[in-house]
């Protein structure tokens, strides 16, 4: 399985309710994907010091399925419109397990 993990820290411009809106956008998009095994995302619970503000954990059948997700027009729209204006930092990793 191909795992994709992304952690975001919001900048000071993030509006109230934005994390829930971001989750809704991503979840709706994920429901359209082939080759997706599981997809979870959401805001931090705030239980750890220095935690990121929002995370995505997606499992794909293989790298090709992830690449289709990563390069799709809808994914790029979500990146551009929903995340880019409000992200201070982003960390990402892909691994197989």
Image (cartoon, helix red, strand yellow):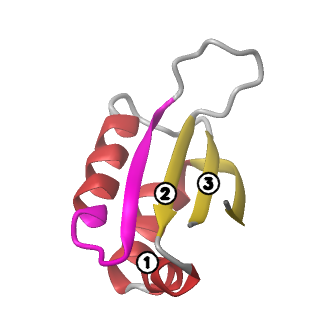
Q: Position of residue 48 (x, y in %)?
A: 70, 15
Which image quadrant for residue 96? Answer: bottom right
Q: Nearer the viewer, residue 19 or 42?
A: 42
**Magenta residue span:** 29-43
Q: Is residue 49 above or below residue 91?
A: above
Residue 36, relative to residue 7: is it above or below? Answer: below
- Mark 2 against mark 1, which lies toward the viewer? 2
Compute the Cα span from label 2 to label 1: 10 Å
Q: What residue is disc 3 on?
A: 5
Mark 2 crowd level (few <14, some 14–19, many ≥20, 10 Å Cα): some
Residue at point 32% right, 36% down?
A: 20
Determine whether label 2 and label 1 are within 8 Å by CB: yes
Residue at 31 percent of width and 63 percent of height: 30
Point out residue 80 in the picture as x, y percentages from the top left corner. Answer: 46, 70
Residue labelled with disc 2: 58
Are dots 3 and 1 in contact, CB under 8 Å?
no
Quadrant in the rendering for residue 35: bottom left
Q: Secondary structure at mark 1?
A: helix
In the image, 81 versus 6, the foreground residue is 6
Q: Check residue 96 in the rendering and tell me which mark sits there, or answer none.
A: none
Dividing the image into 4 quarters, which one contains the N terminus?
Answer: bottom right
Disc number placed over residue 69 in the picture, else none: 1
Q: Residue at x 66, y 34 (%)?
A: 52
Vertical side of 89 occupied by 36: above or below:
below
Vertical position of residue 78 compared to residue 38: above or below: below
Residues at marks 3 and 2, CA–CA distance in whole angstroms:
6 Å
Q: Secondary structure at mark 3?
A: strand
Is there CB contact under 8 Å for labels 3 and 2? yes
Quarter of the C terminus within the rendering: bottom right
Q: Earlier in the sequence, mark 3 or mark 2?
A: 3
Sequence-first tag of 3 and 1: 3
- Position of residue 95 in the picture relative to residue 69 (left or right): right
């Amino acid at each position: 399985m191909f795992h994709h993990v992304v952690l975001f820290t919001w900048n000071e411009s993030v509006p109230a309710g934005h994390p829930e809106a971001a989750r809704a956008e991503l979840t709706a998009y994920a429901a359209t994907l082939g080759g997706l095994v599981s997809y979870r995302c959401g805001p931090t619970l705030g239980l750890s010091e220095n935690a990121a503000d929002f995370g995505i954990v997606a499992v794909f059948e293989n790298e090709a399925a992830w690449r289709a997700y990563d390069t799709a027009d809808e994914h790029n729209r979500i990146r551009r419109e929903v995340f880019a204006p409000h992200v201070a930092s982003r960390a990402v990793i892909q691994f197989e397990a």
